[in-house]
Image (cartoon, rainbow, N blue to C red):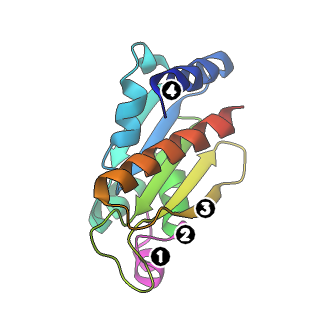
């Protein structure tokens, strides 16, 4: 997502008085970095959680160990719990979560390039989705996942 689009996203959030939080795994804070690259974003961006390990997902976001055991970290169920956990552990109005397999690697059941997203907003139902970016390499998957997460935030605002 280009800088101008992030600026527009932040402007819209500011207009509506919304605070944003992120809960990231495979993107390692890239969504938070994209938001905070824009000067003045501190009035919109509330906080970001980089929960790369399962232990961090459990401790910081309240993801259930049973959910992780049953579905694995790369699942819409975990993405939902991550997004809802980010809302619960912040003063944000909406939160996006990202968990996936950037690569290299993956498996027959969870291929490289599979990324699950969650979008939680106070007073609304949490939405999740899975996007198959394909085995295009770690950097490209992470960049695509970051852009997709920013798009989800933008859609949730408008």
Question: Measured from the top left, where is residue 154 in percent x and y?
Answer: 62, 35
- In the picture, measured across the screen, residue 49 lies left or right of residue 95, that is left
N-terminal-most mark, 2 or 1: 1
Residue with the mark numbered 4: 6
**Mark 2 touches mark 1? (CB < 8 Å):** yes
Question: What element does badge 3 sit on?
Answer: strand
**Mark 3 touches mark 4? (CB < 8 Å):** no
Q: Residue furthest front?
A: 136
Question: What element does badge 2 sit on?
Answer: helix
Look at the image and give the residue range highlighted in magenta: 62-76
Q: Is residue 80 above or below residue 157?
A: below
Question: Measured from the top left, where is residue 128 in percent x and y?
Answer: 61, 60
Task: Tell me if mark 4 has few (under 14), some (14-19) or many (20+) residues whose alpha carbon lies within 10 angstroms of its own.
Answer: many
Q: Is residue 147 above or below residue 82?
A: above
Residue with the mark numbered 1: 67
Question: Measured from the top left, where is residue 134 in percent x and y?
Answer: 45, 66
Tell us which disc is closer to us: 2 or 1: 2
Q: Residue furthest top?
A: 40
N-terminal-most mark, 3 or 4: 4
Which disc is residue 77 wearing?
2
Kindly report the distance in space between the C-alpha atoms of the residues bearing marks 2 and 1: 7 Å
């Amino acid at each position: 997502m280009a800088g101008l689009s992030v600026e527009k996203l932040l402007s819209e959030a500011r207009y509506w008085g919304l605070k944003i939080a992120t809960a990231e795994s495979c993107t390692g804070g890239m969504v938070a970095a994209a938001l905070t690259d824009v000067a003045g974003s501190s009035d919109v961006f509330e906080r970001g959680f980089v929960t790369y390990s399962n232990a961090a997902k459990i401790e910081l976001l309240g993801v259930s160990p049973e959910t992780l055991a049953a579905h694995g970290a790369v699942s819409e169920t975990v993405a939902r719990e991550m997004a809802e956990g980010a809302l619960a552990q912040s003063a944000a109005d909406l939160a996006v979560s990202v968990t996936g397999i950037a690569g290299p690697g993956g498996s027959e059941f969870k291929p490289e390039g599979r990324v699950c997203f969650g979008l939680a907003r106070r007073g609304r139902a949490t939405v999740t989705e899975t996007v198959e970016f394909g085995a295009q390499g770690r950097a490209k998957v992470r960049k695509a996942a970051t852009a997709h997460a920013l798009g989800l935030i933008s859609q949730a605002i408008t």
